[in-house]
Image: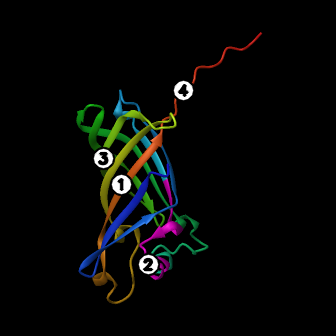
Amino acid sequence: TDHSIVSFKIGHLIGKVRGSFSGFSGEIKLDENNLKKFQATGNIDVDSISTNNEKRDAHLKNEDFFDISNQEHPEYKEITFEAKGFEVVETASGVHKGNINGYITIHGVKKPITLTATINGDPVLDPFGNARISISATGSLTRQDFGLTWKHPAGELVVGDVVEIELEVQGFRKVKMPKEKASK
């Protein structure tokens, strides 16, 4: 929904740079009675990256990092995530804390990732009558593991290697509607 955020931060010189992606979609399959069956998929449009600095954003998209214009590798334009299973650490009042294990693919490289997450499994009705659920998750990855290296002589000193990820996801709950009886 438009209440979801996919963001990151990474070391830059002596500070941190924050950024986000505005183009993303996903699907969550959640059974509150069996969180081990948790499944999620997500797709992020790399071209939607924003660090609030157009020059830096253009640099991140070029061949020094994501290389989204590479005709031979159209997969560079997208980051994908797939998760299967939620390991519960704590549950209280419909809020489940634990770990989401999955795989993330960046720059054509697929690696395992674990996100520390909180799932609000009890749906909340918004003012329009839609049942919503929310998931907050954090994790980290090493950008060089995905081939995101800046070949500039000082590149590795300027840009940190660990990328911290933060997700705030709200989704609409799909409710299975009973099949209508056929009229005779």
Residue that badge 4 annotates: 176
Q: Earlier in the sequence, mark 4 or mark 3?
A: 3
Q: Gap between marks 2 and 1, in whole Å?
A: 30 Å
Residue that badge 2 annotates: 53
Estimate the x, y position of residue 122 in percent, counting from the top left.
Answer: 36, 32
The image quadrant that residue 86 belongs to is top left
**Few, some or many residues within 10 Å of mark 2 (<14, 14–19, 20+):** few
Looking at the image, do the residues carrying marks 4 and 3 touch, with CB atoms under 8 Å apart?
Answer: no
User: In the image, what residue occupies the spot 40% across and 33% down?
Assistant: 123
**Few, some or many residues within 10 Å of mark 4 (<14, 14–19, 20+):** few
As drawn, the residue found furthest toward the bottom would be 153
- Mark drawn on residue 117: 3
The image quadrant that residue 29 belongs to is top left
Residue that badge 1 annotates: 112
| Nearer the observer, 60 or 154 | 60
Q: Amino acid at mark 3?
A: Ala
Q: Earlier in the sequence, mark 4 or mark 2?
A: 2
Q: Earlier in the sequence, mark 2 or mark 3?
A: 2
Q: Earlier in the sequence, mark 1 or mark 4?
A: 1
Q: Which residues are magenta?
A: 43-58
